[in-house]
Image (tube, helix red, strand yellow):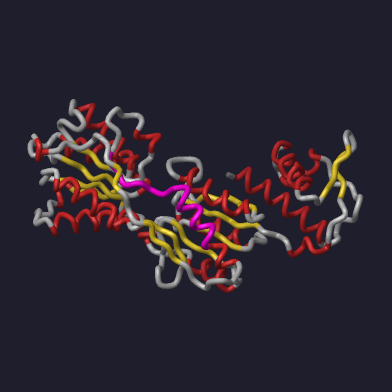
Amino acid sequence: MKKTVKYIEIFEFYKEKIINGDMKVDEKLPTEQEIGEIFSVSRHTVRQSILELEKEGYIYREKSKGAYVNKIDKSKKNKNKVVIVITTYITEYIFPYLIKGIQEVLNSKGYDILLLSTNNEKEREREQLKKLLEYDVVGAIIEPTASALGNTNLDYYNKIKKNNIPYLMINATYNKEEQSYVIMNDEKGTYVLTDYLIKLGHKKIAGIFKEDDMQGLERKRGYIKALKENNIEIDSTIIGDFKTYEEDFYINAFAKSLLTRKDRPTAIVCYNDKIAVKVIKVAKEIGLSIPKDLSIVGYDNDETIAEIFDCGITTISHPKEELGRKAAEMLLLLINGKKEKVSYIFEPEIVEKNSVKNYKNS
């Protein structure tokens, strides 16, 4: 990600100098090697910037001679259309699809996007929000970092608001009353899953949830609600809560402890499909068969993960690209001044596969 930021930084640096007239028409840019030394980056990164400057019409190149400042339409100064997208992750799980949806809509309307990630770390979020304020952007789509731990970077969000930069939150929000957002109905999602298991005859149903983001809290709330409404006693010993940084160790230890009990649960509701996969691997190591000995349900319908197992994983469908597209469409309403605040909630849809045993028919 650092390389992408540097490439944009170089692009913006020369774009601004050209638009402001600090560099004159036909003036030669420094060589790729010189620019690389100035910004302490590789020639590959410099070349990305040069190609983008040429693509946008700010420079022209002459073979074996170098790059030169192009004649720019003065109105171009008002045509900067860059949107920053900040997510917890970029290259894994559901995020490439979500980002694809955002990019599809914004690019079709003439906007470019700058991708930044926080790795779900509060300090990293702070760094990325600072960059958001430094760049010349028209709006932002942000996934809150460790959203259940509160908004520790409220000062930066206030600065963004003060600078009149429209933004909306995706997947979760720090404050539904004040912020625009596009999210899923996560509480209802796990309610549907848990109720589904109960209707198939399961009574001892465990749950594993992430506790440092709002999705995790909402999903746990839906699980608890379904148990209560079906008059099933809440057993805290079969409910696991983990934080992002301890995920692998915790899931492995908790699943082993849970599945070696004499009174082990017949089913487990997992925070997402990624966690479900880890639980299934532990179950198989112990010698349990899915769904004969243990039923598993996940969340997000990550088909790439589900394909690992012949049975697939019964799950809740995450809109992924559709959520990204909806977020981009609603951000454009904010950017164009058609709305002051927007919100949209995707309702859950269960995807039935073969990871659940039907006790009613056995």
In the image, residue 308 above or below residue 345:
above
In the image, residue 134 above or below residue 270:
below
Q: Is residue 300 magenta?
A: no
Position in image of residue 295 (x %, y %): 19, 37
Residue extending furthest right? 26
Name the quarter where the N terminus is drawn: top right
Residue at figure coordinates x 30%, y 43% from the top left? 351
Residue at figure coordinates x 19%, y 47% from the top left? 196
Position in image of residue 255 (x %, y %): 22, 38
Q: Hey, which quadrant is residue 62 in on the image? A: top right
Name the quarter where the C terminus is drawn: top left
Left of 34 or right of it: where is 10? left
Left of 117 or right of it: where is 303? left
Q: Nearer the viewer, residue 249 or 225?
A: 225
Residue at figure coordinates x 77%, y 48% from the top left? 53
Q: How many marks?
A: 0
Position in image of residue 171 (x %, y %): 41, 55
Segment tinted magenta in the rendering: 314-330
Residue at figure coordinates x 14%, y 43% from the top left? 200
Q: Nearer the viewer, residue 332 or 243?
A: 332
Position in image of residue 296 (x %, y %): 23, 39
Q: Nearer the viewer, residue 202 or 29?
A: 202
Left of 201 or right of it: where is 101? right
Residue extending furthest front? 361
Q: Is residue 316 magenta?
A: yes
Q: Hey, which quadrant is residue 358 in on the image? A: top left
